[in-house]
Amino acid sequence: MLSSVKKIKTNRLTWINFNDFKNEEADYLRQEYDFHPLDIEDCISPSQRPKLDEYSNYLFMILTFPIYIPEEKKIISAEVNFFIGPEYLITVNKDKLPPIEKFFEQCQLTDIVRERFMTGNPTKLMYEILNRLQEYCFPMLDHLNDDIDHLESAIFKGYEREMVKKILIVRRNIVNFRKIMQAHKNVIHKLIDKNTKYFIPTTINNYYSNILEQTKDIWDILNNLKETIEALHSTNESLISFRLNDIMKFLTVISVMIIPANLIASIFGMNAIFMPFVKGVYGFWVILGIMAFILLTLTIVFKKKKWL
């Protein structure tokens, strides 16, 4: 057996997990199981589109889950493929999502865990995998919420310019998260509807109603985060615009105040005959005094009008 193929086998159920899936792994599935070629092809090339396909002897399901890349501060999509049969569950976990890896290791090493989840049909095992994958999403949602709180605090402390890029990073991660989780509810609904399959018991609702509720909870949280970050983005843009308007107003007022001084300097620089103050001993200081008086008067007027 290939090194990339990990298998746990009990009297009633077999769980095979792939950490890598290339042509060799595809050939293994073709030899051991009668799967549709397109399903195997979907495992080789990422589809990034959650779906559930039904066949006479098995179900093929694709789900995507978020995974965080700290170096890039980015949430990306990780795809998991499921082959669900009467006595087996096959997972293709090429992105090595930690919940699946840890759970598989627990089933390998612990008899109690193996006896609890790997008896009978694959429904209970499948439920536990999905439940752990969903619980894996909540810390990321909490982290996004903390990021938003930090951004809000920083914006109102005067760091709105520095926050523009950080807001866009959080906004991008929320958008990516929503894209990843968008089709989950429909796929889980379809899975529940397959209780007519002979290897899926009618009690599937008891297991997967919780998965469905968690899917709705995740989606509701994402909607709230989306609305909050958009409102925060608008607020930040308004603060930047307000600050720029303040700067432009201040510069405009300064320009208006300097215009009379420039006019006086231009007049007394014409060197015309009989120009007053020019040839006087204190002429220079008189002209400066006139300029200062005009500037002081304009400053008082502008302050009364609250332009300064």
Image: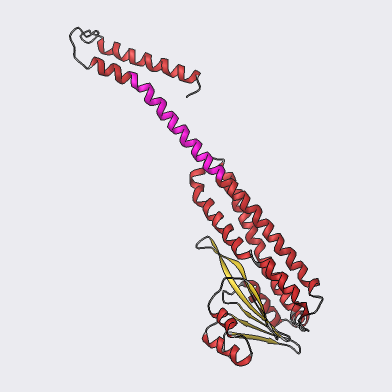
Q: Horizontal and vertical percent for residue 274?
A: 19, 7
Picture quarter containing residue 87? Answer: bottom right
Q: As drawn, is 140 to the left or to the right of 163?
A: right
Q: Horizontal and vertical percent for residue 166?
A: 52, 52
Magenta residue check for 94: no
Q: As drawn, is 192 to the left or to the right of 52?
A: right
Taking the spot 42% from the left edge, 15% from the top edge, the residue there is 297
In the depicted structure, whether residue 28 falls above or below residue 60: below
In the depicted structure, whether residue 96 falls above or below residue 257: below
In front: 157, or 41?
Answer: 41
Taking the spot 49% from the left edge, 46% from the top edge, the residue there is 162
In the depicted structure, whether residue 26 falls above or below residue 247: below
Mark yes or no: residue 195 visible.
yes
Mark yes or no: residue 159 visible.
no
**Could you tell me which quadrant the N terminus lies in?**
bottom right
Q: Horizontal and vertical percent for residue 38?
A: 57, 82
- Magenta range is 234-260
Taking the spot 30% from the left edge, 21% from the top edge, the residue there is 262
The mark tally for this picture is 0
Taking the spot 38% from the left edge, 23% from the top edge, the residue there is 256
Q: Horizontal and vertical percent for residue 283?
A: 25, 10
